[in-house]
Image (cartoon, rainbow, N blue to C red):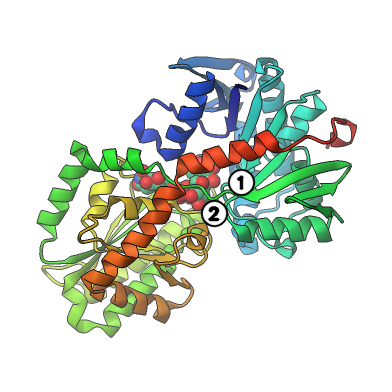
Amino acid sequence: MSRLVVVSNRIADPRKTAAGGLAVALAEVLNNTGGLWFGWSGRIVDQTEVDDVHVQQAGPVKLAMVDLSKADHDAFYLGYSNGVLWPVFHYRLDLADFDAGYIAGYRRVNQLFARKLLPLLRPDDVIWVHDYHLIPLAAELRALGCQQRIGFFLHIPLPPPLILAAIPGHDWLIRALFAYDLVGFQSEADLDHFARYVESEAHAQRLPDQRWRAFGRTVHAGAFPIGIDVQEFTELANAREAVEMYERTKREYYRRKLLVGVDRLDYSKGLPQRMRAFREFLDKNPDLRSSATLIQIASPSRENVGAYSDLLHELESLCGSINGNFGDLDWMPVRYIHRTVARARLPGLYKASRVALVTPLRDGMNLVAKEFLAAQDEEDPGVLVLSRFAGAAEQLKEALLVNPYDTEGTAAAILLALQMPLEERRERHQSLMRNVRQQDVHWWCERFLAALAEARAEEKGTSWLRL
Ligand SMILES: O=P(O)(O)OC[C@H]1O[C@H](O[C@H]2O[C@H](CO)[C@@H](O)[C@H](O)[C@H]2O)[C@H](O)[C@@H](O)[C@@H]1O
Ligand SMILES: O=c1ccn([C@@H]2O[C@H](COP(=O)(O)OP(=O)(O)O)[C@@H](O)[C@H]2O)c(=O)[nH]1
C-alpha cells in the first residue's frame, strides 16, 4: 500500500479529539500507511529562521511543519488566500482586495512548500493537497521533477466562470489545477462551474469519465461531498463535557425553545441576514416572543482582514438593537457569544436546541449542519433550517431549505421549525441521518483516494508546468 502524504495550510494533531472529524478521518488513513502530514506550523518567525522543517511524530504519523515570515504570512494567508480567493470563491467580488503584491507571496509560499516537501517524498507516495491556499502546489512540485500521483480537494465553493474570470491571473490559477491527477469539489454545482470554466476559457476538451484535457495534460474531476465522523461525534456527545453542557442549558432555558447558530465570524455565513430574519420573526409573532431564544456563537476568525472587522460591528449592532427593542426584564431574544466554544461542548448545545439556523450566503459544505443532526435525540429531534446555498443542501434535502437573502421567507421557516409536530420532526431527522451516516467522512476519504488511485497521469512531461 502506498504511503499517504497530506498537505494543508493548517495541521491538526490527529491524536487529539478536539482536532475534528477531518483530522480523525485523515488520521485513520495516515495511521494505516504510516503517513506524512505537511503544512504550516502556525508560527510566524524572522525571515532568517524560515528554513527549518520541524518534524514531530504523532503515533505512526509524521507531522512536518514549516514556519512563515511575517511578510509571507501576510501576503499568502491574509492577502491572496483570504483577501482574494476566499471572497471571490464565495461570490463576493465586492470584498476582494486585488492588491498586486499578494500573488508574489502566494507563489513564494507554494514554492517554499514544494521545496521543503520534495526531499521528504518517496517514489510511490500518493499526495493529497487540501484547499485554496495551495492551488499551485502540484505545479511547483512537478517543476521540481515530482512524478508522484497528486490529488487536490477544494473545501470551499468554486464560483461560475464569469466570477472566477474577475481574478487577475485567473487563467494561471486554473491552469495550475491541470498539474494534479484528480481535482475534487464539494458539490455537483462546483464541478459544473469547473467544467464550464475550463471548456469556455481554456478550451479544454471534455473526455469520457469526468476527464478534461488542456495544456497537454488530462485531469480527472469529481464531486466528493465531505461528511462528519458520526461515531466520533456520538462519542463526543456522550462524554462529560457535552452532557454537562446539555443539562446546564436545559436547566437554564427550561421555559424557552432554543434556536442555535454556530459559525466562524465570516461574511460567507450570512449572520446579519440571519439576525434580520430572526427580528422579522419576532416582529410578526408577538405571542411567541418570550418563548424563543437564539444562541449565536460567532467564533473569531481572520481578524486582520478588513472585511471581518466591519462584519463584527454590524453584527454587534444588530444583536444590540434586537435585544433593546424586543427584550424584557426576564428575557433576551439573542444571546450573542463572540468566542470559540470547545468542540467537545457543542453536541450538548445542539441537543438542547429545537432549531439550528445554518444560513450561509455561500458555503463549501458546512459541517455544523451535519453535527447538529448527529447530536439530536432521535425520539425528540430538533429541526435544521438550512441555506440552499450551502454545499450541504445538495445532500440534506429534508431540511427546511431557505434563501438567506429572503428575510420574510427565512422568518416563516423559523416559525415552521418551531411549530413542527413531533411526527414530522422524526421523519425528517430519520431521512437526514441516513445521509449523514452513509456519506460520512470515511466515505468521503475512501471515495477520493479510490478515484485518485484510478486516475492515470497520462502525461509525465513537466516543462509546460513552469508557471
Ligand atoms: O484556517 P482558517 O483560516 O482559520 O479557517 C478555517 C477553515 O475554514 C474553511 O472551511 C471549509 O472547509 C469545511 C470542511 O470541508 C467546509 O465544511 C466549509 O464549508 C469550508 O468553509 C477552509 O476551507 C479551511 O481551509 C480553513 O482551515
Ligand atoms: O466555536 C466554535 C465554532 C465552530 N466549531 C467547529 O468548527 C467547524 C466548522 O466547520 P464548518 O464546515 O461548519 O465551517 P468552516 O468554519 O470550516 O467554514 C465545525 O466542526 C464546528 O463544530 C467549534 O468547534 N467551535
Task: Say the numbered circle drawn on residue 154.
Answer: 1
Q: Which residue is mark 2?
A: 364
Location of residue 342 by image quarter: top left
Pinpoint residue 457: horizontal percent, then vertical percent.
78, 34
Quarter of the image where one finds residue 58? top left
Name the quarter where the N terminus is drawn: top right
User: Which residue does the image show at 15% across and 68% down from the upper left?
Assistant: 331
**Which of these two is toward me, 331 or 324?**
331
**Left or right position of 83 against 379:** right
Identify which residue is drawn at 18% across, 43% down: 243
| Crowd band around label 2 with a 10 angstrom C-alpha radius: few (<14), some (14–19), many (20+) | many
Answer yes or no: is residue 461 visible: yes
Label 2–label 1 contact, CB within 8 A: yes
251 sits to left or right of 259: left
Q: Residue at x 50, y 54 (%)?
A: 365
Query: What residue type is disc 2 on?
Result: Gly
